[in-house]
Image: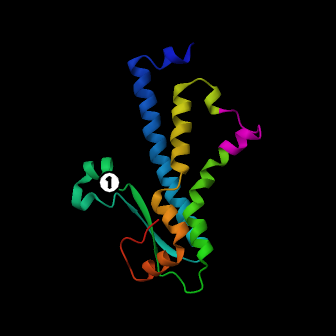
Amino acid sequence: MDPLSLASTPFSLVAVGAVLLCTLGVGTVAHEYAHALALRAIGVDCEIRWLTDRESAGLLRASLLGTWASVRPRNVPADAPAWGLRAAALMPLALLAPFALVVFGVLPDPLATGDPRVVAAAVAWAACALPSPQDFSVVWYAERAMERANADDPDAAL
């Protein structure tokens, strides 16, 4: 069957959209837990907050336009290395590991399958692996992020 004809039926388009949204949800959770795992590995306590804007904007608006999730370091030890915080900020890039296995021929190429659902899932997963602008801010200003986390600043998040 032609991949374009598979995506042209209304049911198939809904299926592709559902796969895309589900993969984005799972990928967002994986992204935030990647930050938390790296922070805990260097001895930094942290909390994960989901839909942090829901109190001020309402659940629907927060889920569509707000911050979906953030990891907030707490009580960063004085001897915690700044490179550890930088690594934690870039840790979601590890979600690209399956695509590296494609390059080495271990896994099949999901884009070559021609199935729009598989392509949508692959694109959504890769999008979740990208560090956010706030993550890059922590990479460049890790010392400031550590100070803000110890000052209990609500904006100190990955």
- Residue 151 lies in the magenta-colored region: no
Quadrant in the rendering for residue 113:
top right
Q: Secondary structure at mark 1?
A: loop
Position of the N terminus, as image quadrant, is top right
Residue sitting farthest toward the bottom: 78
Q: Residue at x 41, y 58 (%)?
A: 69
In this rendering, the answer to whether 1 lies above or below 69 is above
- Does 11 sit left or right of 87 as displayed? left
Residue sitting farthest toward the front: 140
Q: Position of residue 80 (x, y in %)?
A: 59, 81
**Colour scheme:** rainbow
- Does 69 sit left or right of 116 as displayed? left
Amino acid bearing label 1: Gly
Q: Residue at x 59, y 76 (%)?
A: 82
Magenta stretch: give its range: 99-109
> Label 1 crowding class (10 Å Cα cut-off): few <14, some 14-19, many 20+?
some
Q: Residue at x 31, y 49 (%)?
A: 65
Total count of labels:
1
Q: Residue at x 55, y 18 (%)?
A: 3
In this rendering, the answer to whether 151 lies above or below 53 is below
In this rendering, the answer to whether 72 lies above or below 152 is above
Q: Position of residue 139 (x, y in %)?
A: 55, 67
Q: Position of residue 119 (x, y in %)?
A: 55, 31
Residue on which the image places disc 1 = 66
Q: Position of residue 128 (x, y in %)?
A: 51, 48
- Does 19 sit left or right of 96 as displayed? left
- Residue 101 lies in the magenta-colored region: yes
